[in-house]
Structure formats: structure tokens, C-alpha cells
Image (spheres, grey):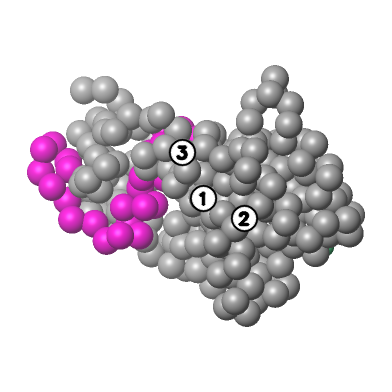
Amino acid sequence: MRLLLVEDDDHVAAALSAILARHGFRVTHARNGEEALQALLPADAPPFGVVLLDLGLPDQDGYEVCGKIRKRTSTPVIMVTARSDVRSRIHGLNLGADDYVVKPYDTGELLARIHAVARRTGAPDEAAPGPNGGGGPAVVRLGPVAVELSTRRVSVDGVDVPLTRKEFDLLALLAQRPGVVFRREQIISEVWRTSWEGTGRTLEVHVASLRSKLRMPALIETVRGVGYRLVPPPAA
Ligand code: CA
């Protein structure tokens, strides 16, 4: 997904761009409101999936920039600001912002919010296709296991297997790309909406529970020191 980062602080922008790039975003950096509006103009480039808009800009008020962006494009806008009071949030949302993140933020939360906004607005989110995003199939079949993304039902050999919300989210995430290794931080950020390290044990517990409930211990493989991947069973 293309992402427009509007941020006048070069240090913040460089650090954030690196994180975003690692998560598959193609980042364009604008240092002020004018650059941001210019970047949104060209019609020949693929459209931006989301705009991350810092409100404290040198040339124009960030709220004003948001209003102008809204007038010329439907690209979702996430406002990033140190102003945390309710009136500022409401003002931002009234101007057409899709979400509002207060500095200092947790990068895991920021990434989760970007993905959530992209899913809601139907922006192409190839960095992490959501259950109903990315044009993926509604049902993922893995040998005897069927994962119905829209109804959140999972069955093995046609028999429903009740999963908790997080167990389903975890399975659905891995099932989006069978064979691909998902890093622990990535899973924690996507499923638990946090980058909190303490969630590590929770992840292990959920993987163990999925292996046991689906009665397929080999379905989710531990990639030591990295994370997990889903290994599709051989076709019967
Ligand atoms: Ca700023």
C-alpha cells in the first residue's frame, strides 16, 4: 500500500518511514501541507491507501490541510498529534479524518490503526490483507480445515470447531498466506493490536490451543526465533 507521511520533523519521519517500509508500505514523505497536497495530485500514480497527517505543520494548520485533502480525494486520513483533548479529536473527525492517534503512540497500535482504516475504507492493503480485504477468498481450505472468513466459522472435516475471538484472528491471519512465515511482532501487532512484549506468552498459548482444538499439531509450525507459519496439509 502507498502511504503519504506528512511530518515536518525529519528524525520522526525517518524512523517512522523505516518501520512502515519494513511492514510493506511504500512511503512518500511530505514535509508540510503544500507538499502533501501536491503529492495527492498526480493521477498517473497508484492512489495512496492512507495519509498519516501530523497536525503541527510549519506552513498550514493540519486541520486545514485535512479539510483540503478531503475536498480533493477520498483517501483515508489518520491525524497524528500531541493534542489529546476531546474537542481536538472531535474537530479532526468532523473535518473528515478517519482516525486520530495521539503522540507519543505505540507503533504497533499505529500500524493496527492504519490496517483497520484501510480495511474499513476498502483501500488495497496488500501489506496485510484483512479477513474481507485484499480480494482474498471467503473460505480458506487447508486440507480438512475450512476457515470461513466472513462468518468466522472454522470446521474440520465439516464439524464446527468453536474458537475464541483471538484464536480465530490468529488462524485467519496465518491462513491468509499459507507457507509464509509471520514474525511474532507482526502477529502480536495484528491480532492483539499492541506491540507489548508481554503478549509473547499469550501468543504461544493461543498457538498451542489452536493446534489442540484443530487436532492438527503440525498445521502451525514454529519457526524458532522468528515466528510461525501455517503448513497446509498435503492434499488427500
Ligand atoms: Ca510537527
Q: Position of residue 143 (x, y in %)?
A: 25, 30
Asked if the residue at tag 1 contacts the one at tag 2, i.e. Cβ–Cβ closer than 8 Å, the answer is yes
Residue of label 1: 117
Query: Which residue occupies 42% across, 37% down?
Result: 133
* Residue 29 part of the magenta-drawn span: no
Q: Where is residue 139 in the image (x, y as percent from the top left)?
A: 26, 33
Q: In which quarter of the image is the C terminus?
A: top left
Q: Position of residue 12 (x, y in %)?
A: 83, 59
**Which residues are the magenta region?**
155-183
What type is the residue that disc 1 sits on? Answer: Val
Q: Work out how far the residue at label 3 is from the one at label 1, CA to CA, in angstroms.
A: 8 Å
Residue of label 3: 122
Q: Is mark 1 within 8 Å of ligand 1?
A: no
Tell me the quadrant of ligand 1. bottom right
Q: What element does badge 2 sit on? A: strand
**Mark 3 or mark 2: which comes first in sequence?**
2
